[in-house]
Each structure stands twice: as structure tokens, then as C-alpha cells.
Image: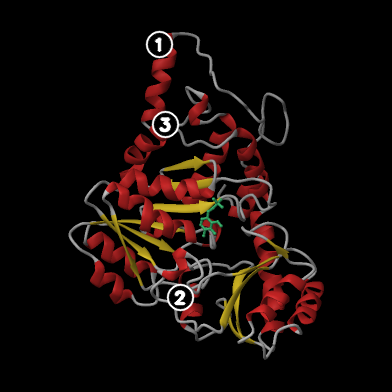
Amino acid sequence: MKKSISTFLKQPIKDNTNRSANPSVTRASTILFNSMQELHQHEKRIKANKKISYYSYGRYGSSTTIELENILKELEQAYHVFLTGTGFGGVSLAIMSICRPGDEILVSDNVYGPTREISEDLIKEFDIQAYFYDPDDFNDLKNKITKKTKLIIVENPGSNTFEFQDLSKIVKLAKRKKILTFLDNTWGTPLYLKPLKLGFDMSFTSATKYFSGHSDAMGGSLAVNKKLFKKVMFFYKLSGYRMSADEAYLIIRGLRTLDVRLKKHYENTKIVINFLKKQKKIKEILYPYKPGSKNYKLWKKYYSGANGLFSIVIKSKNKSSVVKFVNSLELFGIGYSWGGFESLVLLQNLKGETKYTRIRKYFRFKKDEHIVRLHIGLEDPKDLIEDLRKALTYIK
Ligand SMILES: Cc1ncc(COP(=O)(O)O)c(C=O)c1O
């Protein structure tokens, strides 16, 4: 029977030994075999990406992480999924697996801060050069391709300023030029967008966010096609990347309700945005909610849903009043990350206030336009609106 993804997420694993509805948490370093022959045979199966229910050594994972890999493989329609201990591990795994001295990479200018930092600074030390392209201008990307370009790193939408790109155009160009492609799909999740199906070589999601959904686990998922399996596996094994069985269990538990939670985040967000768009103190809302706008059209073209993460632009010469707005919110926690059950807020440092924002090239906002990122959680949106209404009065 062909099942919908919602049904699939409720069903994937039972523990047949213990008769529980959920997998067991298998913590293991040593995995025991009946003979040397069996051990060697098993290692061959792993190398060939055959179906397995345990690894040959705990450094590569356990039965619990394999269960998570299997769910994500189905969700991503991937040849293999590499799990890492943090989301960012998945980004660095992709870059370090693929790039070698003399290579160039192209990175969208709106990427997550540490993705910028590894591209700009760390890989330079290995003689790999990163160039940043304007996410709003496909020709800029096109013009920056050289014979040395090895990889294009796209984050869609950019997690602070939320520009959407024409993804098929990027893939088509990259294939023509024989360049590999990576998409940070943490915002859309493979529930709403399947990057590998679109033609990307690597699809990355920080499992810390909506996959886990409860702000208590960290992890990364790097899904790859067959072409890249061996290359990424080589680096994965030798760099010691791994996800613990406990984190994998929590992420499996989160995934059971991913579809339900995302729908509710989206519903709540639409209600809150309806309020925010009427507020004079808010100049712009960086979310695909306006039919007819470029970002809305590109969102509709590729995604089957949206979530609770967006930014608002507040125009004010009085920055401390914007800080007061943020600080005075009672129901929005101030802190990094997103995708959990709760509402969050952050005043973004995107105007050259840190080393990495200074070098962001394609930034259309002015000095007195402050970007505040909100994550709309699963609370009652009426309460969130009241909280925002009160806090907005502080902005001068
Ligand atoms: C878009 C995006 N990619 C990657 C990451 C890194 O994930 P993690 O925090 O799990 O390391 C984050 C974290 O905020 C993110 O927002």
C-alpha cells in the first residue's frame, strides 16, 4: 500500500524484540560478531551501502542511528544520509568531503553565519577560495563561475533575510558546468522540498531545528546521491563524525509529529503576520506571504508548505528602543536556534557589527533598518500578538 508521508512518519519503526512502539536506544562502541568472516562480510555490506541493522563499530552509529537514517533516506529520497552530532557538522562534512586545494566554491551571500565563516576563513587555509554571490541575482552567480568552481552552496531561503532563489536554474547551470551543488534546506525540511529530487547533489538539514522540534537535541543530516556516496563516506569515517543513539532517538521522536507541528507553526505564523503587517512601526516582513512578490512566487514554485521562522524590518534611528522592544517580549525567548515548540526572538547583527557581517556584500537594508528574527512557536497566537503589541510601543 502506498502511504502518505504523514502515515509513514507515524509508522517507521517498532522494536520487535521488546515489543515497544519505538526503537530501543542502543548505546554501543563494540559490536560483537560470531566470527572474523562474519565481521568482514558485514564491513563489505556497509561499504556497498546495503541494508543493515547494525554497524561494525560504534563510531559509525548504532541500530538507533540506522533507524533515523532510514526514515531520512525515505523523506529525502536519498541514496544515503550521513548523521552528524550537530547541524553544523553536516555543513562542514559537505565542504571538507568535496573541496581540495586549488578549488573555488560559490556561496550565497545570505548563508548562516558559521557557513560564511568556514567558507571565508577556514578553507582558505587549505588553499580553497570562496566567492559570494547575490542571492537575488542569478546572473551574478553565473558570472562568478570559473573552471575551478567545484561546489555551489545555497541556503534557501537565507535564514536571516529570507531571499528565495530559483533553484532549478541553479541546478541546471551547475550540471552543465559539472559543478556539485549543496542546499541547506533547514527552513523547508524535506517534508516541503526535496532537494535531491530537484537535482542537488547534497541536501542538508539541521536536525536540531524542526526535526527534533523540542529544543533539547542537536544533530545534522546530510543526504547525498549515489555519485557522492563514496567520497563523503571516506571523509565521514576518517573525521570521526557521528550522532549519538540518544540524540537519534530524540530526533526520531520529533519526526513523528513533524507534519503536525509544521502545520501549526505555519497557521500561527499567518495569524501573527496578519497582525504585524498592519503595524506602522514595521517596515517589512521577510516571509513569503504577499502573493505576487518575487519571494512568494519562488516559494510557491518549489515548496509545499512554510513554517514559523521569519524576520521583521524595523526602521528606527533609535536602536536602543528596538533592543527594548526585543527585551520586553515576555513570550519570546532570546536565544539562538529555532524550530522548537517555543517562540524566540533575536536582533540580528547584520550591518557590519561583527567581522562576518561586515563582509556581507549584497545587503539592501540601511543603517537605521533593524532586522529582528522571530520564531513563532506553538503557543496560542492571540497571546503572542498581545505580547508583540505591548512590546512594539517601546519602539521610537
Ligand atoms: C540555516 C542553518 N543551517 C545550519 C545551522 C547549524 O545547525 P546547528 O545549530 O544544529 O549546528 C543553523 C543553526 O542555527 C541554521 O539556522
Tell me which numbered mark, 1 or 3, is placed earlier along the sequence: 1
- Counting residues from the start of the chain, the first of labels 2 and 1 encountered is 1
- Across and down, in percent, residue 36 comes to 42, 9
Residue designated by label 1: 37
| In the image, residue 29 above or below residue 146 | above
Q: CB under 8 Å between callouts 1 and 3?
A: no
Inspect the image, locate mark 2, and give the three-letter code of the amino acid beneath it.
Leu
| CA–CA distance in space, label 1 to label 3 | 17 Å
Query: Which residue appears at 65% of the width and 62% of the height?
Result: 262
Q: Residue at x 72, y 76 (%)?
A: 324
- Residue 54 in percent (x, y) is at 52, 26
Q: Is residue 22 depicted above or below 199 in this figure?
A: above
C-alpha span from label 2 to label 1: 54 Å
| Residue 171 seen anywhere in this rendered image of the structure | yes
Q: Residues within 10 Å of mark 1 (few under 14, many from 20)?
A: few
Name the disc covering residue 298, or none. Answer: 2
